[in-house]
Image (tube, helix red, strand yellow):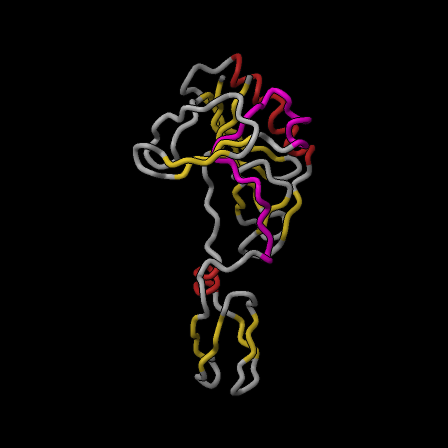
């Protein structure tokens, strides 16, 4: 099996901030403007239709390319022919090419989780030569996701100094002492909802 490495992000069409696409997602959430962005299947088809041929037939192991694409989205793309590896210690991953369900194990060198899974049906139809995904995110993130910090935290009302109990489910929090509605600042909101960073994922080609 031949593997290709992918790093890809788009610019949010509403606020121009970068959004990582750490897998073939159908919807992503912009943590800056709180918009949910739909990623059409045709977008993914355009990304992969030429890339797959280059990885299989043109690149040698360790070779790749960078692209800035101005189309449906402003896209920053890095791709190349590279064996699937641990995201932390970079140790090559041994993958069963016949995997037909989600399989997760810990890297034997550094214990970082590694996930191998078949592509979703819609993606398989678009790119039939892609048989496996490694460390790819398939779960769409939206503004309704659970806050990263477990349990409430305390924040002071900027008007009266009263204690606000913040659980991260809403960014506009009413103060029970002075009745003003407090908009949580960026540093607190990011602590509750950490910004997703761009990560490398892999495709397995027959």
User: Left or right: where does residue 161 sit relative to residue 123?
Assistant: left
Vertical order, 117 against 192 (above or below): above
Q: Position of residue 183 (x, y in %)?
A: 53, 71
Q: Position of residue 195 (x, y in %)?
A: 47, 52
Which residue is rendered at x = 47% and y = 78% of the image? Answer: 164
Outermost residue, top side: 57
Which residue is rendered at x = 49% and y = 17% of the image? Answer: 1
Which residue is rendered at x = 49% and y = 31% of the image? Answer: 116
- Magenta-tinted stretch: 121-144
The answer to whether any part of residue 82 appears in the image is yes
Which residue is rendered at x = 51% and y = 18% of the image? Answer: 55
Please state the total of marks drawn on the protein image. Answer: 0
Vertical order, 104 against 186 (above or below): above
Along the viewing direction, whichever of 37 and 93 lies nearer the viewer: 93
Q: Position of residue 69 (x, y in %)?
A: 58, 33
User: Left or right: where does residue 195 sit relative to residue 69?
Assistant: left
Quadrant of the drawing holding the C terminus: top right
Name the quadrant containing residue 25.
top right
Q: Is residue 129 magenta?
A: yes
Along the viewing direction, whichever of 15 and 125 lies nearer the viewer: 125
Vertical order, 21 against 147 (above or below): above
The answer to whether any part of residue 78 appears in the image is no
Along the viewing direction, whichever of 76 and 148 lies nearer the viewer: 148
Vertical order, 163 against 170 (above or below): below
Q: Is residue 31 magenta?
A: no
Name the quadrant containing residue 24.
top right
């Amino acid at each position: 099996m031949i593997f290709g490495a992918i790093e890809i992000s788009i610019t949010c069409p509403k606020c121009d901030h970068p959004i990582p696409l750490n897998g073939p997602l159908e919807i992503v959430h912009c943590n800056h403007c709180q918009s949910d962005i739909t990623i059409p299947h045709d977008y993914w088809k355009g990304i992969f239709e030429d890339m797959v041929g280059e990885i299989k037939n043109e690149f040698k192991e360790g070779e790749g390319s960078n692209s800035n694409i101005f189309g449906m989205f402003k896209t920053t793309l890095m791709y190349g022919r590279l064996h699937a590896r641990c995201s932390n210690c970079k140790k090559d991953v041994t993958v069963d090419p016949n995997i037909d369900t989600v399989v997760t194990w810990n890297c034997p060198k550094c214990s970082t989780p590694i996930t191998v899974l078949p592509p979703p049906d819609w993606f398989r139809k678009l790119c039939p030569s892609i048989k496996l995904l490694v460390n790819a995110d398939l779960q769409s993130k939206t503004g309704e996701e659970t806050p990263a910090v477990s349990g409430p935290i305390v924040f002071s009302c900027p008007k009266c100094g009263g204690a606000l109990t913040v659980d991260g489910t809403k960014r506009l929090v009413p103060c029970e002492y002075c009745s003003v509605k407090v908009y949580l600042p960026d540093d607190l909101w990011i602590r509750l909802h950490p910004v997703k960073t761009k990560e490398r994922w892999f495709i397995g080609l027959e």
